[in-house]
Image: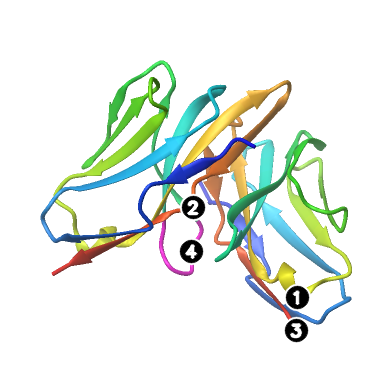
Amino acid sequence: GESVGLHLPTLSVQEGDNSIINCAYSNSASDYFIWYKQESGKGPQFIIDIRSNMDKRQGQRVTVLLNKTVKHLSLQIAATQPGDSAVYFCAENALSGSARQLTFGSGTQLTVLP
Amino acid sequence: KAGVTQTPRYLIKTRGQQVTLSCSPISGHRSVSWYQQTPGQGLQFLFEYFSETQRNKGNFPGRFSGRQFSNSRSEMNVSTLELGDSALYLCASSWDRREQFFGPGTRLTVL
């Protein structure tokens, strides 16, 4: 079946460096992609989204890049801070008939080193 | 605006019992989706309700069911609990069925 997967399960970066988290998706019908951050004991928190008609979208310290040719999504975090330590999930959203659902990747644990 | 709320936050049940979890969406959101999160399987879609109708269902057995009320609040029920049902159950609400906002989840432990 269709799936969304992450390239790396863990990522460690030095505080102040930039972080890049990658994600591959396989459902060509997906028209909306989201990155979520999940801290221990909490539900996923929306970070940034991008529609399939865009290649890049920037937020505060975060940028999402979408490459539809190779079905690849990435999240860039600038000047990574200790508070950025969490599990990051990419998710794709596809419409099939009247049904719409999010399919999540397996997640990447980001650890920020002092 | 208040966020998505879920009750209870923690629950301990024994095998064979049934459980009902509740979710109150963000005011104005009519779509509510449920997910199961486990270390082994990650986040898996259970079902989505929109305007009191189930619009989509994930690949879970019939023991998992849900409903949505006219005020958009939703409940999910799991009958005949199994050990493997131990998980964090997350509810998410949405205005446009795209951007979803998650609640803190209900941690279910089945003994």
**Residue at mark 4:** A42
Which residue is nearer to you in this view: B91 or A110?
A110
Work out whether residue B30 or residue B28 is closer to the camera in this orientation and state it: B30
CB-based contact (under 8 Å), mark 2 and mark 4: no
Residue A39 lies in the magenta-colored region = yes
Where residue B41 appears, as percent x and y from the top left, is 60, 59
Amino acid residing under circle 1:
Leu
Contact between marks 1 and 4 (CB within 8 A): the answer is: no
Provide the residue designation for mark 3.
B111
For discs 3 and 4, the disc positioned in front in the rendered view: 3
Per the image, label 1 sits on a secondary structure element best described as: helix
Q: Is residue A50 left or right of residue B37?
A: left
Q: Quadrant of the C terminus of chain A?
A: bottom left
Q: Which residue is mark 1?
A: B83
Which residue is label 2 attached to? Answer: A106
Dot 3 amino acid type = Leu
For disc 4, the neighbor class at 10 Å (few under 14, some 14 to 19, many from 20) is some
Q: Amino acid at mark 2?
A: Ser
Residue at 30% across / 27% down in the picture? A57
Q: In the image, A96: left or right of B13? A: left
Tag 2 subunit: A
* Prevailing SS of the magenta stretch: loop
Kindly indicate whether the residues beneath marks 3 and 4 are on one polypeptide chain: no
- Quarter placement of the N terminus of chain A: top right
